[in-house]
Amino acid sequence: MLHVSRSQDGQARLPTPVAVGNGGQAIIALVMIIAIVTIIFTQIAFLNLDAVAIANEQTESELLRITAEGYAENAALRYLRDSAYAGETLSAGDISCTILVTDLGGGIDDIEVTCTRSGRSKTVGLQATYASGIFQFSKLLTR
């Protein structure tokens, strides 16, 4: 029901409208801020997942390299004891390593080790030289 008031001169007056606040604009601003914050946190989460994947790749690569270097040193020792050693295939858990000794001629032999795990592989190698009854080994290098 509408109350009609009368002015002093007797005329009917309608009530003054009540001012409405800016509540709608505040809600829209709040929703926008929440959306922006959500997008920022989602982006940060995806960046962290990428960093974890890259770190995992680096760890896998280092594990394969260290394993290959260990087998290359072992192959060099076996070659020292038996100059007819031609290599072999060895497994350590889910890592498979192939050792290959190749005669390059002139008393130089190449020892190459390739280790593989889950589709990734790493190859290292060194050369062994035999001259005047002395074996010399080159520096172990990643190939």
Image (cartoon, helix red, strand yellow):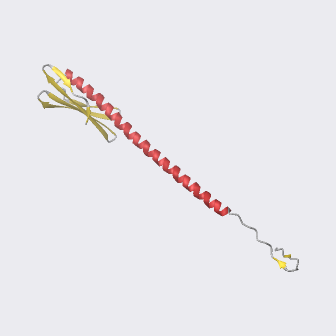
User: Would you place residue 123 above or below residue 43 in this image?
Assistant: above
User: Would you place residue 38 above or below residue 137 in this image?
Assistant: below
The answer to whether residue 105 of the structure is visible from this angle is: yes
User: Would you place residue 28 above or below residue 80 in this image?
Assistant: below
Q: Is residue 108 left or right of residue 8?
A: left
Q: Is residue 77 left or right of residue 48?
A: left
The residue shown at (16%, 20%) is 134
Q: Is residue 62 left or right of residue 21?
A: left
Q: Quadrant of residue 114?
A: top left
Q: Quadrant of residue 84?
A: top left
User: Would you place residue 77 above or below residue 52 in this image?
Assistant: above
Q: Position of residue 85 (x, y in %)?
A: 19, 26
Q: Quick one: 141 or 92, which is closer to the camera?
A: 141
Q: Quadrant of the C terminus?
A: top left
Q: Quadrant of the N terminus?
A: bottom right
The answer to whether residue 91 of the structure is visible from this angle is: no
Q: Position of residue 51 (x, y in %)?
A: 43, 43
Q: Quick one: 116 or 29, which is closer to the camera?
A: 29
The residue shown at (55%, 52%) is 37
Q: Position of residue 88 (x, y in %)?
A: 23, 30
The residue shown at (61%, 61%) is 28
Q: Quick one: 34 or 87, which is closer to the camera?
A: 34
